[in-house]
Image (cartoon, grey):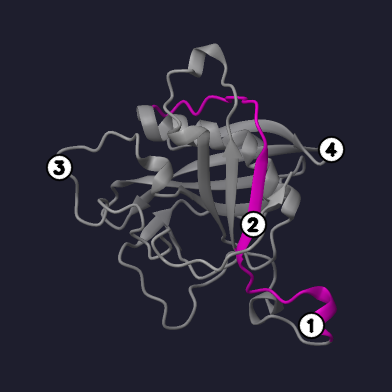
Amino acid sequence: MALLASGREKFLLSICIIRLPADYEFLPVPRGTLQMYVTNLRNRPVERVRVVSLKETVMSLYHNLITGSGDFPVIHFRGPTFFRQESAPFRREEDKENSTHPSQAAPPGMMVPLAGYTSRTTLMNQPLPERVELRTLGDPWTRVHSLMVDGRKTKRVISTVFDSHQSVVTNRWRITDYSENGQCLMSVLCRFTAASTRCVERPKKRKRGHEEEDQDGEGSSQPQPKRRPIRV
């Protein structure tokens, strides 16, 4: 299994829900807003259109968080979407001249943890390659959705995340997009902010390390620089 680390390109995606389908109105949404951190797992900048497209998957993840169901249904909602970039390890094209970010010197793939980086919880997941046979996607721990992103047909794989003891880590999902020919387009780690998990029923007993929403050191308790969100 492959390690999932932090300290990467990261975004905060916010959706304001005006209306949900009747079948899903039972889902409690704190103040009508959900916020989710999106961490890039690859050694290439993620396309902004891919980040925005996660609005199509946010409610699927929230449904799993609230109900515990592994169905991950596609749930459409009415309301605006915003995002802002929280960290930008990659140089902008106009700034880098002849220099290249160290991680981009290697072929496209998964980023290794930053030197000296430590995490209170080791997150693990089944490795997903840069190119796959689409017919092989899907197992008991993943769900595959088909959608259009920027006019391109996309297979979106929602994967459960585990810790080093093989226990499912709540409020963590890996989202990987593949093109029609099986080329990896995006691989990100998603988690809701503490404010967005207020309506989640907590088990009486939980393993140490699963109790805090910010267990991997990326939590919303850390002061974030104020940036103007982009409405999409």
Eye-nearest disc, 2 or 3:
2
Q: Which residue is mark 1?
A: 96
Location of residue 212 with respect to 54 vertically, above or below: below
Most extreme residue toward the left is 205
What element does badge 2 sit on?
A: strand
Q: CA distance from mark 2 to mark 1?
A: 22 Å
Q: Which residue is mark 2?
A: 84
Q: How many marks?
A: 4
The numbered mark, 4 or 2, whose residue comes first in the sequence reads 2
Residue 77, horizontal then vertical, whole percent: 62, 26
Residue 205, horizontal then vertical, whole percent: 14, 42
**Marking on residue 59:** none
Which amino acid does the dot numbered 1 rest on? Lys
Classify 10 Å Cα crowding around label 4: few (below 14), some (14-19), many (20 and above): few
Classify 10 Å Cα crowding around label 2: few (below 14), some (14-19), many (20 and above): some
**Marking on residue 205:** 3
Residue 4, horizontal then vertical, whole percent: 45, 61
Q: Is residue 96 one of those drawn in magenta?
A: yes
Which amino acid does the dot numbered 2 rest on? Arg
